[in-house]
Image (cartoon, grey):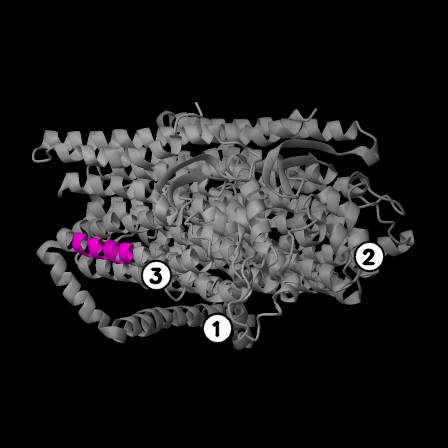
Amino acid sequence: MSELPLITLMVFLPLIGGLLLIFVGDADEAGRARVRAISMAFALLTLAVSAAVYAGFRENFAGMQFVERAEWIPRFGISYYVGLDGISLPLILLTTILTPIVLLYSWGEVEKRVRLFQMALLFLETGMLGVFVSLDFFLFYVFWEGMLIPMYLIIGVWGGPRRIYAAVKFFLYTMAGSVLMLVAILWLYFETGAETFDILVHLDKPVHYALQGWLFAAFALSFAIKVPIFPFHTWLPDAHVEAPTAGSVILAGVMLKMGTYGLMRLAMPLFPTAARDFAPLFMTLAVIGIVYGALVAMVQDDIKKLVAYSSVSHLGFVVLGLFSFNLLGASGGVLQMVNHGISTGALFLIVGMIYSRRHTRLISDFGGIARVMPVFAVFFVITSFSSIGLPGLNGFVGEFTILAGAFDRSPFFAVVAASGVVLAAVYMLWMLQRVLFGGDPSPANLGLRDLGVREWCVLAPLIALMFGLGLYPKPILNKIEPSAKAWVEQVNRRVLHVKPPPEPRLARAPAPVFVEARSLKAVRP
Amino acid sequence: MMNTILFILLLPVAGVLVNLLFGWRRGEKFAGRVAAGVMALAFAASIAGFFQLLGLPAEERLIRSDLFEWIAVGDFRVNAAFMLDPLSSVMTLIITGVGALIHVYSIGYMHGDRGAVRYFIYLNLFVFFMLTLVLGSNFLVLFVGWEGVGLCSYLLIGFWFERPAASEAGKKAFIVNRIGDLCFLIAMFMLIGIFGTLDFGEILQAAPAKLVAGGGAVTVICLLLFAGAAGKSAQIPLFVWLPDAMEGPTPVSALIHAATMVTAGVYLMARAYFLFDLSPIAMNVVAVVGAATLLVAASIAMVQTDIKRVLAYSTVSQLGYMVMAIGVGAYSAAIFHLLTHSFFKALLFMGAGSVIHALDGEQDMNRMGGLSAALPSTSATCAIAAFAIAGVFPLAGFFSKDAILFAAMTSNRGGIGFWLAGAVGALMTAFYIFRMLFKTFYGRCNLSIEQQNRLHESPGVMTRPLKVLAVLSFAGGWVGIPIFAGANLLDGFLAPVFGGGGEAHHEVIFELMMMAVSFAIAVLGIYMAYNVFVLSSRGASAYAERWPGFYRLVFNKYYIDEAYDFLIIQPIRRLSVRLWKDFDDGLVDATVNGAGGFVRLIGSAARQLQTGYVKSYAVMMLAGALVVAFYLTAGAK
């Protein structure tokens, strides 16, 4: 069983499915149905493989599992090197679950260039999964960049009226970050003398204290744009508003986590000292993001934009958890990445459902529609409360552990962040009030039909996950925990001199070992 | 043995599930019967639990039930764990007992409402969360119930969601409560930091060792917990949501906003008494806020004209009594008043509901009057409740209020000031409740002819619960009759929870004198109301004209809502718009767009794209790959 290259299978199944579609025409209705069926089949197959990975995942084990390694370009120390641990597994499952859901949602929604659309989504899945499993910088970078293309197309071709502006803005923002990361990767390759792209090797040997700052900044900036961390967030509302529903779901659900995952997997453990030095800055930005995103979300009049800004707020919690440098914060951070994917993914689907009926997303165009769409209203309310962080639903467990971890590190930041809990209730409930309740539906809304079977099937699994993770998070938490524990040790470790600083001209160089001692803060004995 | 707890908890859940699956098809009658049926069973289970506790030796009266590990990260572990001790047993009896009566009453009240099935689902769900709140054996499980009842309160206040005022009130209730919840959360983080656990028993054990009595940490924790309690139990400054919550169906007001949920804050502080005991400063704050709340709310209740609003402010005021009792360390007196209040206030609300039902939704007392003839059961039961809340011997309210006043005077944390606040409050209570009674049921009838013709007493399914509650309002206080110089029944039962604090010994004569004084106050208040609203022809208008400014101030509830709107809500909204328009769209995007001709870049790239984006992107990628490859090759050499 474990002989099967499960990860490779999982990552490349969608790609194969996408390539197969080239040979299937989508000119007529039957062809389109075939295209959709094939892509759905491959997405489900991928989900099945990821389920097998989940089932075979070794608990109480912190390291990489299901590792596969093959030489690729030995001359440059590049290899096809993949594996996963408790940090990447939840995100992988999130990806393999959201993709078929999005495909199912688009089944009746996207009629324009169906084949290309399905291909883009499948290629995107391969790209995303690839990023989560790569243990080689080169491979990581290939997937990282490769993922951008389909998303760029999804926004640019199937998006709203200002889609070109949004797509290019999205592309340039993330591209700017990627270039910095590329430079830093190359520097690591050449200047450390390791001459390998093996991520694990580099993780074992952090570079000298004096040099960490710049490298960390390059990586962190690239990921900060992706998250996005305040003030790099302005591409997000544009991208979301213009993207088609499927794009928004994947963008918010999975792609934003590339940023936090990158911080967690690469930027912080590669340069732990610098990460700790920068922690106050990142905690500040995270907290600003939480409050700022919530405040701006509150005054939006477009539902989709409101949800987009709420993402800025929610991702701030994740960043806060990571930069708490303790087990509660890190585990909560990973869990919250998944929670946000489920809740916000569902919210975007809900917004899409209402948009496709009324062709407007303005809050003021609605009101009282709970009466004409009661089932829709139930789903909407549950999802909103999941996003607000009501105990018993998924959002609470993540937020609570993050805040408890952050409080241990810095009560001030935790308290300010916790005010986001109040603000989240304000903007979500005010929106619900104006969309679902508070009056009789206007004539234009009287004829809205309630959810159909397909839409029901799209939302039901996500709602089930909200309850499941809220009431019994153990099956995921106990897989996260060992890896998160190892990660906490990694980012808290003292600096190691891999290579002495090239020149002693840096005045701060001799000090590091002593500077470090204060940063060591265990969770609690 | 442990199954009793599970039964109590899961019966309402069963009701929710059955109604979710079959209720929609089978209709409101079915749904109502299921909902009320599971409540009756839950009450039976609560009684069974009570007797199980009684069967144990006093010091061992605690039944635990750990279901599963809920959140576990490192050393921080929280179980989905429940416990039944005397305190939670009293609470479950109130919740399921009074709750069952209100469910039965609802069958009549909600008859014909197209959302009746939804209503019963919410109501059962509420009871489940309320039971979770009082049965949880750690702060986090309590918090689950705490937030859950908040959710149900939100759903039930906004039950008639087509009414803008209803959905607005639901939202307001949830948000104001969230402010308190935020403080509750922070208190939990501090507890985690100090104790590494949130379990009541473990914290109780470790508290003396890990907390300095009177120290800063415990004071902050207690003040934060109190802020949480002030949200749920509608204390100053967070009480503004409760009067608006009257937009919900009246049985909801009886169940959630009188008998059960709003007492959760009092319960929380009683549950965490071992922390409050360590902080005299926090205790004093609690007592002062409770006293202030009871006075402010009682004064507003004296001038409201909407029958439900009078009761809402009355509830705020009575909660103030309970909070003050906690503040002076009289925990079991607070729970005693919580118990009796749940009887007579639920009765008053349901009586008001019966009136509103009879008048097709009329709530203005100025348009009522003289209803006692047409509504004999309602008016008689309401009169009993009014005597009870006014504190007339030997009804329920007399004993519980007397217990609080006595403690306020004699406790080492009390003082004459607290007693005075309670006494003045008692006078106002007697006045406003009899004002309500006289204006509604007696005197001249101000109904339209049409209304008079349709006037009818409520059906038996509604009046029977009223009668049961009337009996309880009359006799329910007898569980707490002071057996002089010793503890009463309720005190004795609760003693193992609160560590059986040995109250100071007092002369029987002194205790009797105190009782006589509080009885006299009640009679005086009733006489004043009788004088103004029955004997005088002009009612209260003479007083309103004599002090117009003061009257308007009180009538408009001291303009607190307006002040919040002006000082907090509007500035935040303006700031948010500024942030969005000026910072996001203005500063950041303008900088990005301006710097390096981003706009032109986008423009030209976009034009490229429109001519054949896939191709040009492929070219770009290829170029990028070549650069990388070149760099690698060059660098490797």
Q: What residue type is labelled 1?
A: Leu
Image side of residue A449 versus residue B521, left or right: left
Q: Which amino acid does label 3 sit on?
A: Gly
In magenta, the rendered stretch is B618-630
Q: What residue type is labelled 2?
A: Met
Image side of residue B144 versus residue A119, left or right: right
In this rendering, which labeled residue sits more in front, label 2 or label 3?
3
- Residue A290 image point, x, y percent: 45, 60
Above or below, comparing residue A86 to residue A168 in the picture: above
Local crowd size for mark 3, using a 10 Å CA cut-off: few (<14), some (14–19), many (≥20): some
Local crowd size for mark 1, using a 10 Å CA cut-off: few (<14), some (14–19), many (≥20): few
| Residue B552, visible in the rendered structure | yes
* Residue at x-position 62% and y-position 69%: A511
State the SS at label 1.
helix
> Marks 1 and 3, how far apart in space?
42 Å
Which of the two labelled residues, at mark 2 and mark 1, occupies the earlier sequence position? 2
Marks 2/1 same chain: yes
Task: State the residue in front, A424 or A260.
Answer: A260
Q: In the rendered picture of this protein, how many numbered marks are placed on residues?
A: 3
Q: Badge 3 is on which residue?
A: A177
> Magenta stretch containing residue A383, yes or no?
no
| Residue A365, visible in the rendered structure | no
> Marks 2 and 3, how far apart in space?
77 Å
- Residue B354 image point, x, y percent: 49, 42
- Residue B36 image point, x, y percent: 52, 30
Marks 2/3 same chain: no
In this rendering, which labeled residue sits more in front, label 1 or label 3?
3
- Residue B428 lies in quadrant: bottom right
Q: Badge 1 is on which residue?
A: B567
Q: Badge 2 is on which residue?
A: B514
Task: State the residue in front, B176 or A102.
Answer: A102
